[in-house]
Amino acid sequence: MRKLALPLLAVFTVVLTLGLGELLLRALWRNPFRRESPELVLTLRAQHANSDREFDRSALHLDPPRIRFRTDAHGFIEPVERIPDPELRLAVQGGSTTECLVVQEELRWPNQVAVQLEPLGFRVNVWNAGLSGNTAHDSLVNLIEIVAPLHPDAVLLMNAINDAGLLADGGYALRAPLPDGWRAGGRFLLQKLSADSSIMGLVRRSLAFEKQVIHRSGEEPMAYAHTPDPEPYAARLRSWVRTARAFGIEPVLVTEPLSTLRNELTPPWTDAGALAVFNARVRAVGSEEGAAVIDLAALVQAQPEFQEPAKFFYDGMHVNDDGARIYGRLVATELAREVLPKLRAARASQPPPQIAR
């Protein structure tokens, strides 16, 4: 009993001393921080750098059943540096329909753009900066923080359906900085420790927010009660276009396709009517800002495979391997029509670098 009393007495003494000190300071000293709020924390919604994972897509009955998902040191999805010394470098931003998580590495449509531009006479590398759930708001932040410092020649944006979903349920306020530094710090510590410890890696893998899973929904896809106002989305598109140009990058907007296929994998918030409204805003902003628009939503309508969407998508919205090839071909053809010749001509008109003597 005496052994237990001594530690308790020590704790009591420390608490009492601190309490008396606090009371004394409050009486004699004005604390300049007494009403100050803590710093806000904004988490960048971007891929982890240097990821190397396997993803099981056997539930989709695709061959091969397991695929690899890797990122480079900047968080771009591999393949990144497909060829050495490319003529041009492009970046692609978007959500899960750009990320192409369940598509084979070489077949993800941003990489297919690079592959299918080669026979059209352009040697390019394409950086895939897509992330599931990202919106135009996230892409604007990531453009400034991640993409622009690497100076690509052009950047493509395909964000629409996630923006419609977010604006129908909470809006962009859900992307605001938060006073939860302790949570961000804990997440950072877990991610840091998991890189050096297999035990912590297993813990991280078991947590819901770290799992790479195919989400099956028990809810039927349904239309929103009211189509969300697209103007906050359009404002971010305009900001994105102007920001890209301010950094000397050619902006290219891309409309987002959606088929009539609906199954248990289709996100319940998928609304074709709302997406059509948001795609219309993409076209309008492109016209207002003089930015190129690749109308992928319209282009896929002419593809024979699109008439049998189960061969193109696995849930009506996300492409499979075959759909990714088609996306890549369509986007490559449109880029080769005007955007890339314009960039090539601009580069040719620049004076050669001076050699220091």
Image (tube, rainbow, N blue to C red):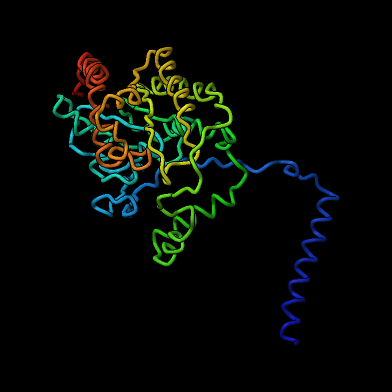
Residue 166 vs residue 211: left or right?
A: right
Name the image quarter holding the N terminus.
bottom right
Please identify the quarter of the rendering in which residue 110 is found.
top left
Residue under the point 29% across and 37% down: 312
Q: Is residue 94 visible?
A: yes
Which of 323 and 68 lies nearest the eye of the viewer? 323
Residue 297 vs residue 192: left or right?
A: left
From what the image shows, is residue 159 above or below residue 8?
A: above
Which of 217 and 288 lies nearest the eye of the viewer? 217
Name the image quarter holding the C terminus.
top left
Which of 67 and 122 lies nearest the eye of the viewer? 67
From what the image shows, is residue 239 above or below residue 177?
A: above
**Residue 267 image point, x, y percent:** 46, 41
Residue under the point 18% across and 37% down: 83
**Residue 67 image point, x, y percent:** 28, 51
**Residue 333 image point, x, y percent:** 22, 23
Which of 268 and 179 lies nearest the eye of the viewer? 268
Q: Is residue 53 visible?
A: no
From what the image shows, is residue 329 above or below residue 24?
A: above
Residue 331 vs residue 204: left or right?
A: left
Residue under the point 41% across and 39% down: 262
**Residue 187 image point, x, y percent:** 51, 53
Residue furthest bottom in the image:
1
Circle count: 0
